[in-house]
Image (tube, rainbow, N blue to C red):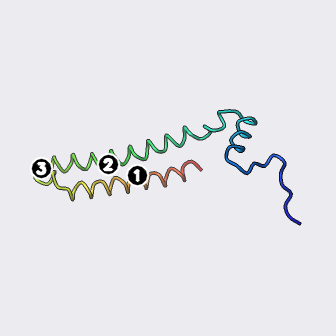
Amino acid sequence: MGMEKDKNFNKTLRGTVQRVYQKEGAMAFYNGMIPSLLGIILYHGIGFFTYHYLKDELKRTHPEWSRSKISDFVFAAVGGCFAQISKGREKFINK
């Protein structure tokens, strides 16, 4: 008593791609691309903005520390944290 195999079932990637193309057309391969790209752009934008904002504030307030590699590391980590937090909030907002 096994499961019946679908006649249209394809075991290969090539067969699956052909089937999707024939049934749904070329645009089926691009569904969801725009929201994904927007999410990536926002994620990296928030990280870069946070990093550069903190870096500029450090230059303004403590110019002698602005060339420190440790500050670069810390600001990049903080920027990454803000980007991750915003990404997590985005999932809850979109639901």
Q: Amino acid at mark 1?
A: Ala
Which badge, 1 or 3, is on the more N-terminal residue? 3
The residue labelled by disc 2 is 50
* N-term mark: 2 or 1: 2
Snapshot quadrant of residue 41: top left
Name, please, the residue furthest toward the left: 64
- Return the residue at label 3: 63
Residue ID at (43%, 55%): 84
Left or right of 63? Residue 54 is right
Q: Amino acid at mark 3?
A: Pro
Disc 2 to disc 3, C-alpha distance? 18 Å
- Tell me residue 82's x, y (percent): 38, 54
Q: Is residue 31 left or right of residue 75?
A: right
Residue lying at 72% horizontally and 44% vertically, measured from the top left: 15
Q: Secondary structure at mark 2?
A: helix
Kind of element beneath mark 3: helix
Sequence-earlier tag: 2 or 3: 2
- Distance of label 2 from label 1 (alpha carbons): 9 Å
Q: Are marks 2 and 1 in contact (CB under 8 Å)?
A: yes
Q: Residue at x 37, y 54 (%)?
A: 80
Q: Amino acid at mark 2?
A: Thr
Where residue 22 appears, x then y in whole percent?
A: 74, 35
Left or right position of 33 against 62: right
Callout 1 secondary element: helix
Q: Residue beneath label 1, please?
A: 83
Residue furthest bottom as drawn: 1
